[in-house]
């Protein structure tokens, strides 16, 4: 099975119809999969590293009645986004400029510079996508109506060394076997959607691209925003209870919860109801 066929197979199970849009940015063409009423409040979803926008399908199903959902393939990560030759995203500033262009492509900002699609958006990120979302919200608070961080990594605490060591072979030389073995370990053997797992098999064929790294987002830039943070109790990438305490200390006005019985990588797939409630 090709990557495109596996991708479309997962996307075909989304609540339809789904509109796939290629949005031009200075860093390449970004694929955005959108569904829900055109005039409804917008929700923009960023996946974690190594995933695609399709990981949000079950969550989208709980949102489309009352939201316009826009799920984004990160440039440089697996998906249908195509990086611009010679214009790689290399730093946080590049990520902010890229996401500015993505939101502008959904709908231009208003006269006051706010918005994106229909005004300030609810911006949601999982894992590495949450790190991107937090940095963007700190840099562009006027474009954010609400920020939701789903088991964020490198935002409030660092990664566990054991997790990094376990992930390293898969990151450096991904194969379907290594990817499935790592996911089975991290999720504690949770039953994951087989179509999504087949797509992850195909992800192994993508060129290995080093993700943007940098400092943690500055909490002061987020304290004036409505922020919701959800941690996965069984995450192996960090200690969820410790990360939650750090989040509450950094953002006293945020609502921070730990979802019981769910792991980091499985969270968007196995807890869509909890995510939909957080975004309602």
Image: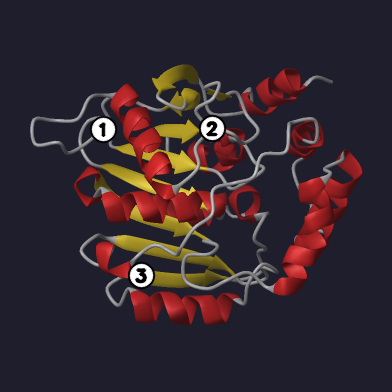
Q: Is residue 176 left or right of residue 147?
A: right
- What whole-number distance in Å separates the C-alpha atoms at marks 1 and 2? 19 Å
Q: Is residue 39 left or right of residue 18?
A: left
| Residue 213 visible in image | yes
- x then y, percent, for residue 185: 83, 62
- x then y, percent, for residue 163: 74, 67
Q: Are marks 3 and 2 in contact (CB under 8 Å)?
A: no
Numbered disc total: 3
Quickly name the residue at label 2.
Answer: 75
The answer to whether residue 76 is above or below residue 138 is above
Mark 1, secondary structure of its residue: loop
The quadrant in which the N terminus is found is top right
The answer to whether residue 139 is above or below residue 57 is below
- x then y, percent, for residue 74: 53, 36
The crowding category of the residue bearing disc 2, from other C-alpha atoms within 10 Å (few below 14, some 14 to 19, many at least 20), is: many
- What whole-number distance in Å separates the C-alpha atoms at marks 3 and 2? 30 Å
Query: Any mark on residue 116, and which?
Result: 1
Mark 3, secondary structure of its residue: strand
Ranked by sequence position, the earlier of labels 3 and 1 is: 1
| Residue 188 visible in image | no
Q: Residue at x 76, y 38 (%)?
A: 200
Query: Any mark on residue 255, and which?
Result: 3
């Amino acid at each position: 099975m090709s990557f495109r066929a596996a991708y479309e197979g997962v996307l075909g199970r989304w609540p339809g119809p789904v509109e796939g849009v290629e949005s031009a940015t200075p860093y390449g063409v970004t694929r955005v999969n959108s569904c829900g009423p055109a005039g409804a409040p917008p929700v923009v979803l960023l996946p974690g590293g190594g995933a695609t926008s399709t990981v949000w399908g079950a969550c989208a199903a709980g949102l489309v009645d009352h939201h316009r959902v826009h799920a984004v393939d990160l440039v440089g990560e697996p998906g249908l986004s195509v990086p611009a030759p010679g214009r790689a995203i290399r730093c946080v500033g590049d990520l902010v400029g890229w996401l500015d262009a993505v939101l502008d492509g959904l709908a231009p900002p208003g006269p006051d510079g706010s918005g994106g699609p229909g005004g300030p958006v609810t911006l949601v990120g999982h894992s590495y996508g949450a790190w991107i979302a937090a940095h963007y919200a700190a840099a562009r608070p006027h474009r954010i109506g609400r920020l939701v961080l789903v088991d964020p990594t490198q935002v409030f605490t660092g990664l566990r060394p054991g997790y990094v060591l376990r992930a390293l072979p898969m990151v450096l030389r991904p194969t379907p076997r290594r990817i499935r073995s790592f996911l089975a370990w991290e999720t504690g053997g949770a039953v994951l959607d087989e179509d999504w797992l087949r797509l992850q098999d195909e992800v192994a064929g993508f060129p290995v691209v080093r993700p943007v790294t940098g400092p943690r987002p500055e909490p002061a830039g987020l304290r004036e925003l409505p922020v919701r943070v959800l941690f996965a109790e069984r995450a192996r990438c960090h200690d969820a209870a410790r990360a939650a305490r750090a989040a509450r200390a950094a953002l006293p006005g945020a609502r921070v919860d730990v979802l019981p019985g769910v792991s980091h990588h499985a969270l968007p797939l196995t807890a869509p109801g909890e995510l939909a409630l957080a975004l309602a």
